Image (tube, rainbow, N blue to C red):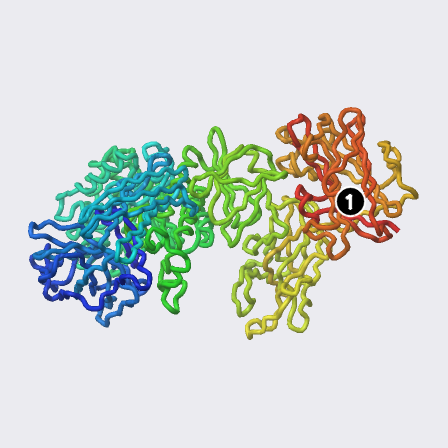
Amino acid sequence: MRTPHARFRSCGALAALLVAAWLIPPAPGQDQDAAVTPVAVLQGAAARRLNAAPDDKTAPNCIRTGKETIEWDLPALPAGLYCFEMRVRTGNDDADPLNVVCRYRLAAVGADGKECAPVGFEPKPGCVPAKTSKQWPVYVGDIVSTAPLSLTEGMRLHVTAAAPWLNIDEVRLFPAPDRYRLSFGLTVAEPRALFRRGEPIQATLSVQSFWDAPGKVPVSFELISPYGKSVGEFKVDLDVPAGGIVAQPVTFTSSLNGCHVLRMHAVYERPGVAAFEYTQEIPVGVVSVPTADRLALASPFGVHPGGLKELYQSGFKWVRLWDSGDVWAAHEREGKGKFDFLATEEKVENFRRAGFEVLAVLAYSPTWASTHPEIGYYVCGGAPFPPKDIRDWQDYCREYMTRFKGRIRFFEVWNEPNTGDAANLQSGFFRGTTADYVALLKAAFEVSRQVDPEIRIVGCSGTGDFLAWTEAVLAGGGGPYMDVLSFHAYTTPSSPEEANLEGRLDRLHQIMEQHGVGKLPLWNTEVGYWQDRRIGAWPATTEQLLAKAPAGLAPNWTSNWPFRPIPEDDTAAFTVRHYYLNMAKGVERLFWYSSITGGMPLLCEDGSLRLSCFAVAAAAQELDGFTYWRRIDLGLRRLQLHLWESDANVKGIVWHADRGTRDVLFRSPAAVSAVDIWGNPADLARTADGVLVTAGRDPILITGPAEFFDTARLQARELVFPVDDAYVVRQVDPERPVKNHTSPAYHGDRRVFGLPSVGDTLGWKLTGIMPGAYQVEVELRTGDAGNLYGNLGWYEVTAVSGDVRTPVRLVPVDDPARQAKAITTQEGGDRAYGWARSETPVQLDPVSEVHVALKGGFGFVGSLALREQAAEGKPVALPKLASPPALDGDLAKVRDLPRFDVRSRRQVAIGVADPFASTSERDAWQGEKDLSAAAWAATCGDVLYVAVDVTDGGGLFPAATGPYNGDCIELFLDLRSPPALGTPAVGDGVYQLLLRAPRGDATETRLDGRVPPGATAVARKTAAGWGAEFLIPVSGLTSGRQLGFDLAIDDDDTGQGRKTQIVWHGTRENYQDPSAYGGCVVAP
């Protein structure tokens, strides 16, 4: 791909410099940069143009091809330091009129012909480029040098630029301010400033003085981690000789992967001269991924090298030779049989020596072979057209494959051939018919089998609507002539999930199956994101990108694809999520576009790596040797949890692709480890209930046993399931389909699905929820302006769990912000939309579904919300006793009271992988005989009595500290009055009584935790386990008084700590959340 927004290309010399710097301006009153009048002005018309073609008649100040040098003789000037301004063409892009400023270089040439190190340029502060009114408008403005040059009499100036069609109208010279008499250069010699984790990060600071006396310069260095924290600091006083240079080596180490920043800060003071401050920063990368030669051949991580002849080692295993000059039009440019593969030969040898595998692209006819040689193209005339003689194509394919036999095994036929067609001769990478393409594919395939049966032909290579193109190629007979089917699934500027990558890949599989090629390997051979240049060593922020968006287009920079650049941290997350989702859908390779070509580079202008490279490095390291296994469905489409497996372990990768974060609780005590997006250790929140992971934009990679991941559940008091996550349970009339509607004029700011026919039904699968009682809320078309909830009777809501169907009666919600409101537009017709809730809580679990069916009218359904509730329908009645029972451990006296059973697998909060599966031998909880309980409760005046009979088949091991760490009863009470009763916050009136199991035959009476005043208890051993009784004074225990009540039993069978917890009603979070307690009411 080549975008119309080509931006920055790193030349080799610049990439080696790896310097990103700025100088802090002096404080008010100090020496200022701005000089009012230049000491010399060099006009473009007076320049000489060097290295131009003999027949090139372009103006002397024009760089036409990017290879010319513009030269001026200097006028008589005093020897010294000078800064420069130039009036030049600054850009050609409405979205960024400064996009070529960084290409300019200026150098001084001595009488001996030797050129000094060039200086670069940056936009002049406060100077806005002006757009010309020519036929091909460009931007013209002033730019300033980033450093001074030392000039002497007789020198010449050279200006170059690595871009075509650039003009230098004027060069102005100014005496450099005093602060430029010290020049600093912070560099690293390591290619791409990329280091392996643990090895020394070595840099050099060079300081050149133009002062006439020596001086001492205190310098401090700091290495900043990817998280913005200091990794190390170093200070030194440098003695700089008069007119000389001193070099200071700097060494740091970092145990962290990712993009670091090395910062230098210096202060220079001289008597009688104001103090000057200097700061330079350069990006430094650290990775621990193995080099390409040590990565598995099955690695999915591929990249485009662009113009690079040697590739950086950051987790990529494959390279695709595209936009690199390695095409037919270059290989056989001069005529039939006149082959030139030298450049390709050098690259392939370098790449393979470094461990990379190569995908070559067969494309672009040379002028002499093209069906339309008269039509110009950037490669050569006629390049995007099919050849006029298919035999020329066959001969070229044979030559290419034969020369690289054993070194290049995969050849792709053309690039994005669906971007043009035979009817439009002026646009597209391939301007032929589908039949023309199939003919090229067939010829390449047949030649490959003649040259080497091991060669594999990659075909289709469509972009944009690649589905239609793929279907056309397969329908046109192309299927038998490809070994791999390729496509380009770009999603920029959106995330892959937002751009429906998964749905597009599902459809691609369907098309392949329909045409009998369902088993062909799939490769995504080109994907990328538009990124803006960095601000110094730091990536551009969202705010900075937004500020550069043209008025009327923001946040976009252009009205056409790819619309706008996105921040580097977003790009890093989207990049690896692309890889993960492609792998999940059966794609074997994905090639990122590109290293240095166009507006989607993986490298910065200074040659260092962008953030995406570090994310890829971590992913490649973590998944090396692993194969994709399956996705765990947590009920939310944008909450992704995918598993990869190897012989020894499982990797789980979790992220949330929507706004905000989602908490996922893994209800397992298994030992696991995790790394973040950069491959650095990630701290996991370990609670009494398991491991809590907050899933957000950046994927988290977790390593652990397979059973750990099956315990994943959504952890939230309120869950919203978007209507896009629903599925069509029933569609009565295909002519009137159940489909989505998003028009604000008709439906307001919401997305809804229409149910046009009675019986149409939408459903949500609640796979990832925690079991419990929920208030069910549904967003609906509820009525009209005259009766906001008049249409609730149109809908039938049902909670479905297996064969059990529970009707849910809807009533208006209490929250005014969610209540129904009418759409008062003409299109809206006063229809009302809002939320309705279940009249009573509904018991739901991970195998439940919620269905919304239409009983009348024309219904519209939006999202589903679930709110965990404190009570299940009706509170349990507490009988009254005539007098308080004695705390003697004899539980026979309570057998006639109503009983609370705590013995169901569904009540096990800690100790099972899945509360709704059958007991597994891997579970800590092994059934009722292992741990269960019966409980009774009653009132007597202002005293609450509770008795608990615990069955424990594993012995009693009360904990010395932290009662819940061993055998223990936890009694939870919420004695607050409404409306505080049942709210999530723990405060006055909320109690947690902890009573340890007895040791041996002794009794236990000590209560820990949050204990009500005057409460007493006793625990004694029984034949099956142990029993306990509680007496708790509670004022106001009159008839009808409601209170929150719950009971948890902790179990330790080894003396090594709690292995199991079983809870009557709530969750393992009872200790900090009273809203899940059961409800009790004092009987009349």
How far across and how far down the image is residue 591, in percent? 34, 44
Identify the residue at image location x=19%, y=68%: 37
Q: Residue furthest top?
A: 1000
On the question of residue 457 being in view, the answer is no
**Frontmost residue, 976 versus 626:** 976
* Figure label count: 1
Provide residue 161's location: percent of width, then percent of height.
19, 56
The residue lying toward the viewer, choosing from 1048 and 901, is: 1048
Seen in the picture, residue 633 relative to 540 is either above or below; the reply is: above
Q: Residue furthest right?
A: 882
How far from the left and from the top, in percent, is residue 28? 33, 63
Could you tell me which residue is drawn at 15 percent across and 50 percent down?
116
- The outermost residue toward the front is 271
Residue 977 in view here: yes
Q: Residues within 10 Å of mark 1 (few under 14, many from 20)?
A: some
For residue 97, which quarter of the picture?
A: bottom left
| Pointer 1 residue | 1012
Position of 281 with respect to 933 (left or right) is left
Q: Nearer the viewer, residue 112 or 137?
A: 112
Question: Residue 1015 at x, y = what percent?
Answer: 81, 41
Q: Secondary structure at mark 1?
A: loop
Q: Say what amino acid the circle numbered 1 marks.
A: Pro
Query: Is 746 drawn above or below residue 773 in the view shown?
Result: below
